Amino acid sequence: MAEHELAQLIERRRQTAKESYGDIAERGGEHLSKSYVHKLATTEQPAMPKPEQVEALAAALEVPEKVVLRAAQQAAGYHTYEETTPDTGTEILIANVERLSPEQRASVAALVEHLLRGM
């Protein structure tokens, strides 16, 4: 069983509410499936869920979307920052991401993922 925070959120819900992966997926609606919820809970480093999947999972787990997003980022291997970033260059990147088109953001995300895999 995976030990990352996203897996813990899913397992905590399963234990406290006595629910299955299917129950969670059903409550999440069209953006979640039983196998996908199982994969998120049991894979050591799952891929980052799409925004609509994060939203659906937050609703299904009855936790704030921000909590699920942060847990998903950490599970996928992304470094998340609390309040400040480590350097000015990173701050500039973060501040300007909104100016990029969706296609440009996807390209930057793919590049960063590729670079991180090579580390």
Image (cartoon, rainbow, N blue to C red):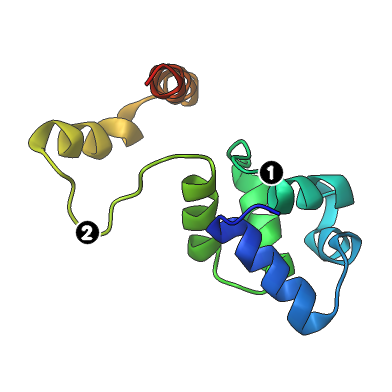
Q: SS at mark 2?
A: loop
Place of residue 72 in the rendered image (x, y in percent of width and height, measured from the top left): 55, 50
Indicate the secondary structure of the residue bearing disc 1. loop
Instruction: Specify the label residue 76 is tagged with.
Output: none
Q: Nearer the viewer, residue 99 or 19?
A: 19
Residue tagged by mark 2? 83
- Could you tell whether 42 is left or right of 66 in the image? right
Depth check: 97 or 64 in front?
64
- Residue type at mark 2: give it: Glu
Q: Given the image, on which type of amino acid does mark 1 rest? A: Thr
Looking at this view, is 1 or 74 the one in front?
Answer: 1
Picture coordinates of residue 42 (x, y %)?
A: 72, 50
The residue sitting at 84% across, 50% down in the picture is: 30
N-term-proximal mark, 2 vs 1 = 1
- In percent of the image, x 51 and y 56: which residue is there? 71
Question: Vertically, is 22 above or below 93?
Answer: below
